[in-house]
Image (cartoon, grey):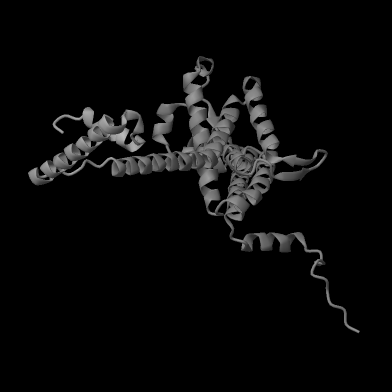
């Protein structure tokens, strides 16, 4: 007797085989997560190397390695410094401070991204993540240069992390499918709109409590994610209203086209016929009275009496 394996049964895979399967899948979501992890491992290797150099009494070399990361890869709040190294506005969105920083961001990216690609083109995930992260960095820079409370620290302040891009993906998804239910531990089925609102409110409330630049960057990413979904809908409605108004104008023009000028012969003929008809109506009035006229005859008489040169 032969038993066929159920399609719902899968043999337990090892961690190595799962990682291999993950790397083989070249979806935009997997690529973004892979890039973030690869960059984190590279930065971790630099930190370990720096610590080793310090242990070997080569502290200055270790410090230089760490200085390279903070100075040339993290985005500075100081605009004059940013102009010298503008690429940091992009490189910083792939950096993470520690293991828990990248762990939380990648879990959130996987959670939001896997739903995102169900409503948008998969490749648009790159746009929302990268542009959302850049907009987040721009809001971080603007806030540190605009609000006086940051004036004393803006020269040394830097930002790093994928949180702006990740929140951009989450908010874009929640804006597209606000009532989509997801099953959360301890909370059960929850709408995406409430998750998005909670995350945004947490960032707003947390601004005075520390890591203000990071929270501004998160809000910048959220703003772009919301705009990415809502603005195209707004412009489509606006465009349809404009096209509807144009159609109405065209119809009104067609209905009110100016008549061609009449020739002398046409004008005289029309004038003669009108006079003849008026005479017939007047004769009818003299015989049977005005009250016996038809409504059409009354209207014609009224119209011709107010027309010059009839």
Residue at 77% over, 62% down: 14
Residue at 39% over, 39% down: 245
Residue 218 or 278: which is nearer the viewer? 278
Residue at 54% over, 15% down: 149
**Left or right placement of residue 177 versus residue 186 in this view:** left
Residue 233 or 38: which is nearer the viewer? 233
Residue 189 or 20: which is nearer the viewer? 189
Q: Quadrant of residue 57?
A: top right
The percent coordinates of residue 30 (x first, y second) are 62, 55
Assign the C terminus to one quadrant of the image: top left
Q: In which quarter of the image is residue 194?
A: top right
- Residue furthest to the top in view is 148
Assign the N terminus to one quadrant of the image: bottom right
The reply to whether residue 60 is visible in this rendering is no
- Residue furthest to the bottom in view is 1
Vertical order, 126 against 302 (above or below): below
């Amino acid at each position: 007797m032969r038993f066929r394996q159920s399609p719902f049964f899968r043999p337990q895979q090892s961690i190595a085989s799962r990682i291999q399967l993950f790397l083989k899948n070249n979806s935009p979501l997997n690529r973004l997560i892979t890039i973030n992890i690869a960059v984190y491992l590279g930065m971790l290797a630099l930190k370990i190397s720096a610590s080793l150099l310090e242990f070997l009494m080569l502290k200055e070399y270790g410090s230089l390695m760490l200085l390279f990361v903070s100075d040339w890869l993290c985005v500075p709040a100081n605009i004059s410094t940013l102009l010298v190294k503008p690429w940091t506005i992009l490189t910083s969105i792939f950096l993470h401070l520690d293991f828990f920083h990248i762990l939380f961001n990648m879990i959130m990216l996987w959670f939001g991204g896997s739903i995102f690609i169900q409503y948008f083109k998969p490749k648009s995930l790159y746009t929302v993540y990268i542009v959302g992260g850049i907009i987040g960095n721009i809001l971080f820079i603007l806030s540190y240069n605009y609000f006086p409370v940051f004036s004393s620290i803006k020269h040394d302040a830097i930002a790093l992390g994928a949180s702006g891009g990740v929140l951009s993906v989450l908010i874009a998804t929640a804006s597209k499918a606000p009532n989509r239910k997801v099953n959360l531990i301890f909370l059960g089925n929850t709408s995406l709109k409430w998750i998005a609102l909670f995350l945004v409110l947490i960032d707003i409330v947390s601004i005075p409590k520390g890591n203000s630049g990071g929270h501004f960057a998160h809000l910048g990413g959220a703003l772009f994610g919301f705009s990415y979904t809502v603005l195209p809908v707004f412009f489509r409605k606006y465009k349809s209203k404009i096209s509807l108004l144009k159609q109405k104008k065209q119809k009104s023009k067609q209905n009110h086209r100016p008549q061609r000028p009449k020739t002398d012969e046409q004008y005289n003929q029309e004038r003669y016929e009108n006079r003849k008809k008026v005479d017939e109506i007047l004769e009818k009035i003299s015989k049977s009275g005005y009250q016996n006229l038809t409504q059409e005859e009354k209207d014609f008489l009224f119209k011709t009496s107010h027309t010059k040169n009839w």
